[in-house]
Amino acid sequence: MITCTPADLVAWSRAGGLYLLETMNSIIPARTRLFALLPSYTRSTHTLSTTHTRAYSRLRPASAPASPSVSPAPLISKDADPPAKSAVKPNLKEPSQDPPLEPTPAQLKLANSIFSKPAVFIKSAAKFEQVPKTKLPEVAFIGRSNVGKSTLINLLTDNKRLVKTAKNPGHTRLMNFFNIGDRLILVDMPGYGFRSRNEWGVMILDYFVRRDPLRCIFLLLNPLHGLKPRDRDAIDMLNAKELPYQIVLTKTDLMSAEKYDKIRRNFEKQIDKPIVGINQKGEGVERVRWAVVKACEVEDRE
């Protein structure tokens, strides 16, 4: 009979893909057969949400003390199956450099002119197969639940009723597409906290790598909360996939200018990217408009 150590089984299970994030119904039968070979070892499950769980193995002698708790899974499980066509290099056009945070008056005039056009809701989508068929360049807004994505889109379009907002996190549950004067598309994405990490990550990454018109992702962060682990997960995902993105700090009116400037510099050191801040008073919005227009390569038709 072939014998092996717990370490051998861990290496084998990883190679065989047993660390995938799956539902309990699909993962337990295979693991039951594996652990039948080792009656003196135990396994446990770590619950991630009410409907989705992550099954994982902790191989140890039954008499050994409990091992340290396992840290939460990242937005995209490193061992999870990639979404369809994820092996294909993203179609995003890599900008030559980040849009200048201090655009010229002429550039601001162009950006404001584009966003003065009628903004129209196109449709909502729960998965990539439902996204609208359009060739217009588009940008997407992502971030934690209740960080201010919907509010920013309303500020950009100067239309407080375009996107419904709510104080409760998780109000935006689908990908929502908005046409800006038949020149470009804005996409309001669900927040990190709405779905389970793996479910959100797979849905969003599927859209990121397969969406041809996508030009840039705007990642919104709350400066009062600092850079949370899931924000870092999102940044790591964008960097790993070489996706162009811009950092936007929201709700800057809730702190003094001195405190905001200190926080902004700290964020730039951690992320190594220029950052623009916005608030509900409209400060910083014109610069975000220009960043969107620049990323979409929209030119003045007049």
Image (cartoon, rainbow, N blue to C red):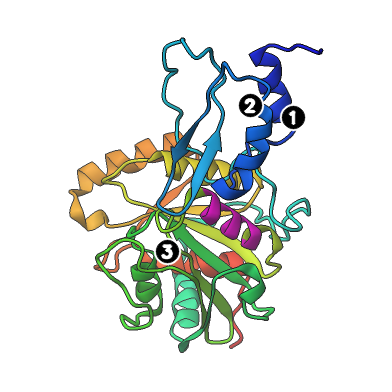
> On the image, numbered disc 1 is attached to which residue?
15
What amino acid is found at the position of numbered circle 1 in the picture?
Answer: Ala
Q: Nearer the viewer, residue 50 or 15?
A: 50
The residue nearer to you, when weighing 50 against 39, is 39
Q: Quadrant of the C terminus?
A: bottom right
Above or below residue 164? Residue 66 is above
Q: Overall secondary structure of the magenta stretch? A: helix
Query: Can you say which quadrant of the picture contains the N terminus?
Result: top right
**Magenta span includes 206:** yes
Where are the magenta residues, as a range? Answer: 198-207
Query: In the rendered image, is residue 229 in sight?
Result: yes
| Real-space CA distance between mark 1 and mark 2, rounded to the nearest whole angstrom | 17 Å
Residue that label 3 marks: 287
**Residue 225 vertical position relative to residue 143 in the rendered view, above or below:** above
| Residue pointed to by mark 2 | 35
* CB within 8 Å, label 3 to label 1: no
Given residues 160 and 53, the one toward you in this image is: 53
Q: Earlier in the sequence, mark 3 or mark 2?
A: 2
Q: Earlier in the sequence, mark 3 or mark 1?
A: 1
Amino acid type of disc 3? Arg
In x, y percent, where is residue 251? 27, 57
Residue at point 52%, 67% (across, down): 292
**Badge nearest the viewer, 3 or 1:** 1
Residue 221 in picture, x, y percent from top left? 38, 51
> How would you rate the neighbour count of disc 3 (Cα within 10 Å): few for under 14, some for 14-19, many for 20 or more?
many
Residue 264 location, quadrant: top left
Inter-mark Cα distance, 3 to 2? 57 Å
Name the one closer to the observer, 40 or 232. Answer: 40
In-image side of 210 versus 232 (left or right): right
